[in-house]
Image: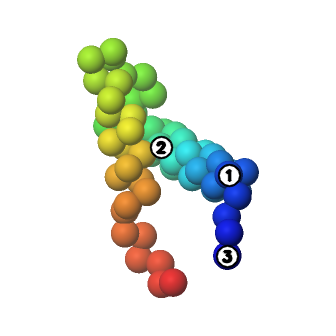
C-alpha cells in the first residue's frame, strides 16, 4: 500500500502534538525535570526528548 506525503506529515504532526501534550503534563507534575525552555547550548535536547517519547515502551500490545 502506498503512503502519501500528506499522510506521513499528518502522522508526524500528530506524534509531535502528542509529545507536547505529554511533556506539558509532566511539566505540571515536575517543572524542574520538565522545563518548557532550554538554553541555546541545550536546544538539541528537544529532539532527544522527542525520540525518547517515540521509542518508549508503553506496554501496549499491538
Q: Nearer the viewer, mark 1 or mark 2?
A: 1
The numbered mark at residue 31 is none
- Local packing at callout 3 (Cα closer than 10 Å; few below 14, some 14-19, many 20+) is few
User: Looking at the image, do the residues carrying marks 1 and 3 touch, with CB atoms under 8 Å apart?
Assistant: no
The numbered mark at residue 23 is 2
Q: Residue at x 47, y 43 (%)?
A: 23
User: Looking at the image, do the residues carrying marks 1 and 2 touch, with CB atoms under 8 Å apart?
Assistant: no
Q: Is residue 2 above or below residue 34?
A: below
Q: Quadrant of residue 57?
A: bottom left
For the question of whether residue 30 can be seen, the reply is: no
For the question of whether residue 49 can be seen, the reply is: yes
Q: Is residue 47 above or below residue 11?
A: above
Q: Which residue is mark 3?
A: 1
Q: Quadrant of the N terminus?
A: bottom right
Residue 30 or residue 6, whichever sits in front: 6
- How many angstroms separate mark 1 from mark 2 (CA)? 27 Å
Q: Quadrant of residue 30?
A: top left
Q: Residue at x 33, y 29 (%)?
A: 44
Q: Residue furthest bottom?
A: 61
Where is residue 58 drawn, in percent x and y? 42, 70
- How many angstroms separate mark 3 from mark 2 (CA)? 33 Å
The first of marks 3 and 2 along the sequence is 3
Secondary structure beneath disc 1?
helix
Q: Residue at x 38, y 50 (%)?
A: 51
Where is residue 60 drawn, in percent x and y? 47, 78
Q: Which residue is mark 1?
A: 5
Where is residue 42 drawn, in percent x and y? 28, 24
Residue 61 or residue 25, whichever sits in front: 61
- How many angstroms separate mark 1 from mark 3 (CA)? 13 Å
Secondary structure beneath disc 3?
loop
Amino acid at each position: 500500500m502506498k503512503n502519501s506525503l500528506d499522510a506521513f506529515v499528518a502522522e508526524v504532526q500528530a506524534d509531535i502534538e502528542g509529545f507536547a501534550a505529554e511533556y506539558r503534563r509532566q511539566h505540571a507534575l515536575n517543572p524542574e525535570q520538565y522545563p518548557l525552555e532550554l538554553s541555546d547550548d541545550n536546544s538539541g535536547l528537544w529532539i532527544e526528548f522527542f525520540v525518547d517519547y517515540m521509542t518508549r515502551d508503553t506496554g501496549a500490545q499491538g
